[in-house]
Amino acid sequence: MSQPFTSFREFYPYYLGEHSNVVCRRLHYLGSTLALACLALAVVQTNAWWLLGALLSGYACAWIGHFFFEKNRPATFRHPFYSFAGDWVMFRDMLTGRIRF
């Protein structure tokens, strides 16, 4: 059953709990990095096809992490907007050392 969240601040601890496996977090990090690279290529090459690459690389890595390592259903299926924001907050937290990866 989907939990009702009234704010992202309330959602984020739940989101982190869904990412307790280090391999899953590393795959999220890889996916986010690849997505940023694709976004940069879209701008530099003025080619919108890279936007599809950004979307596919980000979600493919994350979903592999969830289905094969975390063994749970990605939060994006139940909370797409909070989950998208959670990906980037977790990415920042990994970059700054607040979360181990």
Image: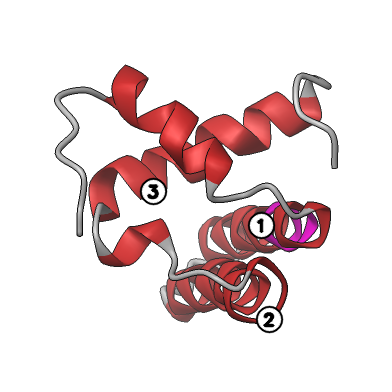
Residues in magenta, as a range: 26-30
Crowding at label 1, few (<14), some or many (≥20) Cα neighbours within 10 Å? many
Identified by mark 3, the residue type is Phe
Residue at the (21%, 22%) spot, across then down:
7
Q: Give the label, 2 or 1, closer to the camera.
A: 2
* Comes first in the chain, label 3 or label 2: 2
Q: Could you give the CA–CA distance between mark 1 and mark 3, rounded to whole angstroms?
A: 11 Å
Identified by mark 2, the residue type is Phe
Return the residue nearer the eye: 44 or 76.
Answer: 76
Crowding at label 3, few (<14), some or many (≥20) Cα neighbours within 10 Å? few
Residue 5 on image: x %, y %: 19, 32
55 drawn magenta: no
Residue 47 on image: x %, y %: 48, 74
State which quarter of the image contains the N terminus.
bottom left
Residue 66 on image: x %, y %: 59, 70
In the displayed structure, 86 sits above or below 56; it is above
Q: Secondary structure at mark 3?
A: helix
Q: Which residue is labeled 1 in the image?
A: 28
Return the residue nearer the eye: 66 or 27.
Answer: 66
Tell me how many marks there are. Answer: 3
Discs 2, 1 touching: Cβ within 8 Å: no
The part of the image, by quadrant, that contains residue 6 is: top left
Magenta stretch, main secondary structure, is helix
Q: Which residue is labeled 2 in the image?
A: 68
Residue at the (35%, 60%) spot, across then down:
76
Residue 83 tag number: none
Crowding at label 2, few (<14), some or many (≥20) Cα neighbours within 10 Å? few
Residue 84 tag number: 3
Residue 92 on image: x %, y %: 65, 28
Residue at the (45%, 81%) spot, across then down:
49
* Comes first in the chain, label 1 or label 3: 1
Q: Could you give the CA–CA distance between mark 2 and mark 1, rounded to whole angstroms?
A: 13 Å
